[in-house]
Image (cartoon, rainbow, N blue to C red):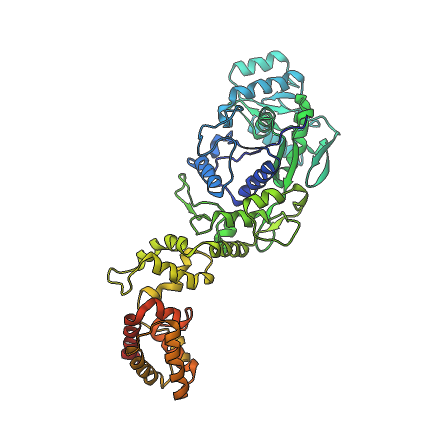
Amino acid sequence: MERKVRVRFAPSPTGALHIGGVRTALFNYLFARQHGGDMLLRIEDTDSTRFVPGAEEYITESLAWLGIEIDEGICQDAPNGKGDHGPYRQSERREIYHKYVDQLLASGNAYIAFDTPEQLEAKRAEIANFQYDARTREQMVNSLTLNKEEVEERIANGEKYVVRFKVEPNIDVHVQDLIRGEVVINSNILDDKVLYKSADDLPTYHLANIVDDHLMEISHVIRGEEWLPSAPLHVLLYKAFGWEDTMPQFAHLPLLLKPDGNGKLSKRDGDRLGFPVFPLEFHNQKDGSVSSGYREEGYYPEAVINFLALLGWHATGDQEMYTMQELIDQFSLERVSKSGAKFDYEKGKWFNHQYLQLRSNEELAEQFMPILTSHLSPNSPLKVSPDVVAKVIGLTKDRVNFVSELWEQVNFFFVAPTEYDEKSLKKRWKEDSPKHMTEMLTLLESHEDWSAEGLDNLIMPWIAEKEYGVGIVMNAFRICLVGAARGPHIWNITDVLGKEETIARVKTALQKLG
C-alpha cells in the first residue's frame, strides 16, 4: 500500500516568519497538493527562553494571507489545532516525550549526564576541539561512569541533568536526500547530542522533531539546507527507535542568498537595501521594534508566491507567471536546485507590477481611494468619483509597481499645480510660450467639442497654420495642466479635467509664468 503524502511546516514562535521560512512552507504545500496529501502546521516551542508573544498568530496569519492552506495542526480557523495527531504545540506534548526519552535510556541508546557548565568549560580548555562523544564520554560525569545508585541519588536530590544520545563511533550514516542524492557522514564527527533537559522538563529540537514526525505520520521532511548537518543524527534516532521502515524521506532546500555578496539572506540585508524579509509587518512585543512586511508594502500575495516559487526551483518551460494551481501542477523536487538562490528583490517588484496590471481599474480605484482622500482638501476642483478614479488609474497604472505609487503619477488630476517644475520650465517653457498659451486659451474657451478627437482637430490645424511647432506648444500646454513634463496623453488629461478646470489651469499658469 502506497503511503499517503503528509508534510509539515514546523516553525518556532521566536519572532517574525522569515521569507525563507515562507518559501519552505510553500514548497511543502505545493508538494502535498500535487500528491493529494496533507499539509500540517506544527509549532516547535520547546525553547521557552526565545518565545515571542504574538509570533504564533503572526505565522498563521502570514500563511493564510499567502493562500497556503493548512489541513491539520495550528491555523487561523483552529488556533488550538485541528486533526487527530495533536496537540500540535510541542510545549503541550511533554508527557509524550517522556515515554520516548525513557525508551532510549532503557535500550542503551541514550544516557544521563550531570556535567555542569563549569565542568564542560574546563574540559574544553583541557582538550582542543572538545566534543562530547565516544572518545570523551568516559571522562565525564554521566550514567556511563557512575553506578546506578549514584545516578538515582543525584536525581532524587534534584540535581539538574540532561539526556544525551549515544552515538556509536566510526559508523557511516547514509542520508537519502531527494534533492542532493545520497549523503554519507561518518559518526565520528557527530557529538552525543542533548535530547532532554531536566531544567525545563522539555526535549530539545532533535528528539521532539523525530518523535512528532513519527507520531504525526509525516512521509516527507522538506526543510532548509541548514538542517542537513542534523540529518545523520535524525537517521540514527529513527534507527534507535526501530522506526527505520517508516522514516520520512528527506529533502533539503537551498538557501536564499543575499542579493549582493555572499551568505544567507538576513533582515539586515532588507534594511540595508530597502525591501522586506517578512511576509507581514511585525511588531515585536519584546523590544517594541517594527519590521516591514510584504503585505503592508503593497505586494499582492500571488506576486509573493510567484516570486518565491522561482527561487531555487524552475519549471520545464519559460513561463514566469503562475497561478497557485499551475505551480501545484508543475512542482517537483527534481527541479529544485542544489545551490543557493540569489534574492532578487527587484524581480519581486516586477511580479507585483504584473499582477497589478491584471487587476481591473475599478478594483485598483477601490484600493487607492483611502490614499487619494488622505491627500485631498475638501474643496478639490475635481469631483472624485469611483468612475473618475478608475479612469485616471487606467491611464497611469502601467507606470507603477504598487498602488501606493499611484499618487505620484496621478496627483495633478486631483490637485491643480501651484508650482512648476524648474527643470521642465527650463527645457519646455519657451519665450513664446505665453503668447502660444494665450492664443490657445481663446480657441479652447469658444470650443464646445471636448472630446480627444474634437480638441485634436481644433489645435493641430491651428499649430500648423501658425507654424509654431507641435512639440513647443503641447509641451507648454502640459506644463500648464500638470506642472511638469509628465503624464499620459494630453487629450486624456483634458478629458478627465474637463473644460472648466483645463481653462482655469492655463489661466493660472499664464499669471504665474507670464
Count of numbered labels shown in the rendering: 0
357 lies left or right of 234: left
456 lies left or right of 110: left
Point out the image quarter for the N terminus.
Answer: top right
**Could you tell me residue 298's position as x and y percent?**
44, 52
Point out the image quarter for the C terminus.
Answer: bottom left
The residue depicted at 46 percent of the width and 63 percent of the height is: 399
Residue 96 drawn above or below residue 358: above
Question: Quick check: can you spot residue 472?
Answer: yes
Residue 257 drawn above or below residue 397: above
The residue depicted at 66 percent of the width and 19 percent of the height is: 144
Q: Quadrant of residue 169?
A: top right
**Could you tell me residue 187's position as x and y percent?**
71, 31
Question: Quick check: can you spot residue 138?
Answer: no
**Could you tell me residue 276's position as x and y percent?**
48, 50
212 lies left or right of 62: right
**Could you tell me residue 168's position as x and y percent?**
71, 26
Seen from the viewer's position, the closer of residues 456 and 194 is: 456
- Farthest residue to the top: give it: 149
Seen from the viewer's position, the closer of residues 446 and 297 is: 446
The residue depicted at 51 percent of the width and 56 percent of the height is: 354
Q: Quadrant of residue 396?
A: bottom left
The residue depicted at 58 percent of the width and 22 percent of the height is: 114
